[in-house]
Image (cartoon, helix red, strand yellow):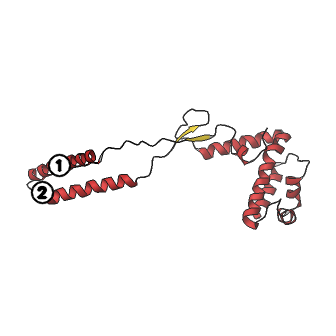
Amino acid sequence: MSDGGLDDLFGAAEGRVVVEEREPVTRRRSAAVTLIGNAAVIGLATVVVTAGLRALGLTISLLLLIALLTGLRLLIHAVAVVAPPPGPRLRSGIGAEAPPAVDALRATVRRWERNLDQAHSDPDLHARNVLPVLAELADERLRLRHGITRASDPRRARELLGDDLWATLSGPGRRALKARDVETYLDAMERL
C-alpha cells in the first residue's frame, strides 16, 4: 500500500528508468608499444604529406613537418585523456531497453493526468494520491519561501495557506475536490 507521496506521482512504482553502470574498459598497452605505434603513425603521415606536397611542387622542412605532426599527435592524445567518460546506458525497470526517443517529461505528465482522472471518480484514490502530493507541494513552497513547514510552525502555515486549504490538507475527513477547488488551492500555493 502506498502513502501517496511524490514518488507515486512521479511513477516510482511503475516502469522507472534505472541507470546501468558500465564497467570501465581497462586495456592498457605498455609505454614502448604506445611509443612505437605513435612513431609509426607520425612516420606514415610524414611520408604521405611529403609525397602530397612534392606532387604539388611544394617543399617543407622535414624537421618542421615531423614537429607539426608530433604536436598534432600530442594534442589528440591530450584531448583523449581529458574526454568525459561515456554516459550511462539507460534501461527500464523491467529490463527491456528504453527507446532513445522517449520524452520522459511527457510520459510523467501523462501519468499525472491518468492519476488525476482516476482520482475524480474514486474519492479514496484522491485522498491517497492527490491530497498528500498537494500537501508536500504546499510544505515545499512554505519551506522555500518562508522557511517553515506545516509541521514546524502550524499557526504561521495556516495563516499563509488560508483556512480552506489548511482544512483540506490537514483535515481527517478528506473528501474529493472539485476541479475549481484544486485550481483555487493551487493559486493560493503559487501566491505563497
The kind of secondary structure element at disc 2 is helix
What crowding class fits label 1: few (fewer than 14 Cα within 10 Å), some (14-19), or many (20 or more)?
Answer: some
Quadrant showing the C terminus: bottom right
Residue 135, image x and y in percent? 80, 53
Residue 175, image x and y in percent? 88, 46
| Residue 43: numbered disc | 1
Q: Which residue is mark 2?
A: 62
Quadrant showing the N terminus: top right
Q: Amino acid at mark 2?
A: Leu
Q: Is residue 155 left or right of residue 97?
A: right
Please give the count of numbered marks on the rendered protein.
2
Q: Earlier in the sequence, mark 1 or mark 2?
A: 1
Asked where in the image residue 65 lies, by quadrant, the reply is bottom left
Q: Is residue 125 left or right of residue 173?
A: left
Q: Amino acid at mark 1?
A: Gly
Q: Residue at 29%, 48% (x, y): give it.
A: 31
Give the farthest residue toward the right: 173
Residue 98, image x and y in percent? 55, 37
The kind of secondary structure element at disc 1 is helix
Residue 27, image x and y in percent? 37, 41
| Residue 90: numbered disc | none
C-alpha distance separating marks 1 and 2 = 11 Å
Q: Is residue 110 left or right of residue 161?
A: left
